[in-house]
Image: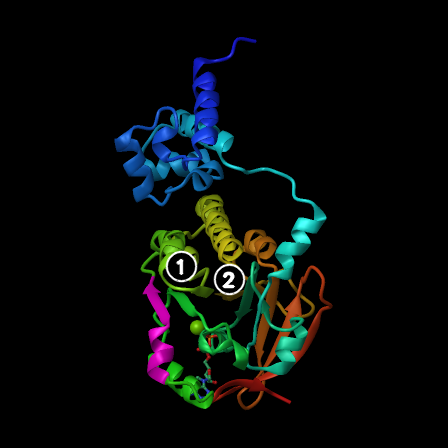
């Protein structure tokens, strides 16, 4: 079969780059001139790896190039990028040994999670309004800023706030309860309000830029699904909603893997009339959210500040429940 001249150019480029050991830039890709490169960078496709794993449709939609051209660019990027390789079990074990765990503030809940929220994974907390999702997110944020010798990450935190429920006053209360300097704690928490689903997606894409400036070991999205739920209503828009949510979840997971960070998200429930036995509340987002979140915790209200946290669908931990308490000082054990 005749090889296309483009392929030859790419092979040559690859060879040259290997010899020179110069990093390959977007402009090195066939068909990418200065203007296209600029457009791509504006839309978050700022390195070869990001392009290599992009979907042609996303790339075409976001940067305004034709889908055919997008496919060509992606294929070229794949040749340069080290993607799609198999890892040995040993390599995966090594990566997993780097996993760090973040305390929720409740020892019971930490134990249920095998020691806390894991980096390189997405942990989802879902439950009704007032079940304590935001309280747990704020506590996680405070805990992540704590020094390592006190069980924290000594890191900065990113919060994507979609419901305008971030309260610095509450963070101050929780920080004081841990004998932390509240001002210092607030300085380490970076909050971005997301005004709609697309804005939320964009903020997650840009998170990597902030992580280059600050040591971010915790990324929170509170709530993951509220914008998607209100903007994509009805059967006709379900496919699009799920596609966008899928992309968003994978962006978050990628951030967690690259930066060895914990990803914590919240999700609402809706009454599912098809369930006649057991609890009829099901999380929003369906299979997409369910399959991408590694750990899912269902929060139920109980008496006097208590909440029941139930771990479901974990890949390697047994299902189980623990009781936590929402107090003035933050999250503690409930019993
Ligand atoms: P969700 O995000 O799931 O809708 P929240 O995390 O906002 O729910 O939880 C709200 C609940 O948190 C309140 O009903 C109350 O029980 C508890 N809470 C909030 N602030 C405090 C506080 N300062 N002291 C004690 N409990 C609080
Ligand atoms: Mg909330």
59 w.r.t. 147: above or below: above
The residue that disc 1 covers is: 211
76 w.r.t. 7: above or below: below
Residue occupying image coordinates x 32% and y 41%: 41
Q: Residue furthest top?
A: 2
Q: Earlier in the sequence, mark 2 or mark 1?
A: 1
x, y percentage for residue 21? Answer: 44, 35
Query: What secondary structure is found at the residue carrying circle 1?
Result: helix
Query: What secondary structure is found at the residue carrying circle 2?
Result: loop
x, y percentage for residue 83? Answer: 55, 38
Ligand 1 falls in which quarter? Answer: bottom left
Q: Nearer the viewer, residue 13 or 169?
A: 13
x, y percentage for residue 188? Answer: 37, 72
Q: Are marks 2 and 1 in contact (CB under 8 Å)?
A: yes
x, y percentage for residue 222? Answer: 43, 66
The quarter of the picture where the C terminus appears is bottom right
Label 1 Cα crowd, 10 Å radius (few <14 / some 14-19 / many 20+) = some
Q: Is residue 62 left or right of residue 319?
A: left
Stretch of the chain drawn in magenta:
182-193
Describe the colour scheme in one phrase. Answer: rainbow
């Amino acid at each position: 079969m005749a090889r296309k001249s483009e392929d030859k150019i790419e092979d040559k480029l690859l060879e040259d780059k290997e010899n020179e050991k110069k990093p390959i830039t977007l402009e090195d890709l066939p068909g990418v001139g200065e203007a296209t490169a600029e457009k791509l960078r504006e839309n978050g496709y700022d390195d070869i790896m990001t392009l290599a794993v992009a979907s042609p449709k996303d790339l075409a939609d976001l940067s305004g190039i034709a889908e055919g051209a997008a496919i060509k660019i992606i294929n070229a990027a794949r040749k340069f990028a080290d993607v799609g390789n198999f890892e040995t079990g040993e390599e995966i074990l090594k990566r997993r040994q780097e996993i760090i765990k973040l305390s929720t503030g409740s020892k019971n809940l930490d134990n249920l999670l095998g020691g806390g929220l894991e980096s390189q994974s997405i942990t989802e907390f879902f439950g009704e309004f007032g079940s304590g999702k935001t309280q747990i997110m704020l506590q996680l944020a405070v805990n992540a800023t704590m020094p390592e010798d006190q069980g924290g990450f000594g890191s900065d935190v990113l919060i994507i706030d979609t419901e305008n429920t971030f309260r610095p006053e509450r963070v101050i209360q929780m920080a004081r309860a841990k004998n932390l300097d509240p001002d210092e704690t607030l300085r380490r928490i970076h909050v971005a309000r997301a005004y709609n689903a697309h804005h939320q997606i964009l903020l997650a894409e840009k998170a990597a830029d902030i992580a280059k400036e600050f040591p971010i070991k915790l990324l929170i999205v509170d709530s993951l699904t509220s914008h998607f739920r209100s903007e994509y209503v009805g059967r006709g828009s379900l496919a699009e909603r799920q596609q966008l949510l899928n992309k968003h979840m994978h962006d978050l997971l990628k951030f967690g893997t690259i930066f060895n960070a914990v990803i914590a998200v919240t999700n609402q429930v809706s009454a599912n009339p098809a369930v006649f036995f057991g609890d009829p509340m099901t999380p929003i987002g369906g299979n997409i959210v369910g399959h991408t979140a590694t750990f899912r915790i269902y929060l139920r209200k109980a008496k006097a500040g208590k909440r029941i946290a139930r771990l479901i669908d974990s890949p390697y931990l047994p299902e189980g429940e623990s009781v936590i308490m929402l107090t003035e000082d933050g999250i503690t054990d409930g019993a």
